[in-house]
Amino acid sequence: MIGGRFITFEGIDGSGKSTQLRALAARLRERGGTVVATREPGGAPGAEEIRRLLVEGAPGRWSPETEILLFTAARRDHLERVIRPALDRGETVLCDRFVDSTRAYQGIARADLRATVDALHDLMIGREADLTLILDLDPARAVARERARGGTEDRFERFGTAFQVRLRAAYLALAEEFPARCRVVPADGEAEAVAARIAEIVA
């Protein structure tokens, strides 16, 4: 379970990505691995500034097209400054969201812009994860989790439960499209049980 791999965590808001990323990072470090735990949008100073533009404010603040450009800009900065250097050092990178989020959110659930997302990704990023863990949870439960958590980074959650339903379908479609890379992980139940499922997949 040690060595330079790029593992991403995906899923609808409230599915437990951040919790499970931290659990896997701890497990890998206990086994002697060097792990970089990061997130998108963000993960690098410039990308974190763009994050605030994307995840705060009114739902209609940006069009889907503008969001794609902002996410890609943040991802490029993150790739240059954090992800690629860590992988070049032979470290394991765990990332809370990557391009599959843009494919699901802007490319499928918000608008029919999948071709635009993929074209920009190929041009400016050119890197897929080695393994993508898609945490799957009933949207109603996920929305309840997010409401209980609170906070200001709720712009996408404010699109409502129907949007989360479309997102879940988009992620499951991506898992079918990329079966060699994506694994769907049931995210209901205790966090420890979900972490055990993830550890088995990664091992």
Image (spheres, rainbow, N blue to C red):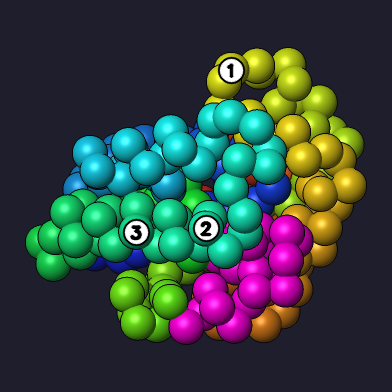
Above or below 153: residue 31 = below
Q: Which residue is mark 1?
A: 151
Q: Is residue 127 visible?
A: yes
Circle number at residue 106: none
- Density class for disc 1 (Cα within 10 Å; few <14, some 14-19, many ≥20) is few
User: Which one is earlier in the sequence, the residue at label 2 or at label 1?
Assistant: 2
In which quadrant will I find the C terminus?
Answer: bottom left
Chief secondary structure of the magenta portion: helix
Q: Element type at marker 2?
A: helix
Q: Is residue 193 visible?
A: no
For image coordinates 81% across by 26% down, the residue present is 144
In the image, the segment drawn in magenta is 100-119
From the viewer's side, name the closer residue of 173 and 32: 173
Number of the front mark, 2 or 1: 2
* Type of amino acid under label 2: Thr
Distance of mark 3 from mark 2, alpha carbons? 11 Å
Residue 39 in magenta stretch: no
Q: Which residue is mark 3?
A: 73
- Density class for disc 2 (Cα within 10 Å; few <14, some 14-19, many ≥20) is few
- The x, y position of residue 158, in whole percent, is 74, 33
Above or below 64: residue 160 = above
User: Which one is earlier in the sequence, the residue at label 1 or at label 3?
Assistant: 3
Distance of mark 2 from mark 1, alpha carbons? 24 Å
Tell whether label 2 touches label 3 (CB within 8 Å).
no
From the viewer's side, name the closer residue of 163 and 64: 64
Q: Which residue is mark 2?
A: 66
Number of the front mark, 1 or 3: 3
Number of the front mark, 3 or 2: 2
* Type of amino acid under label 1: Gly
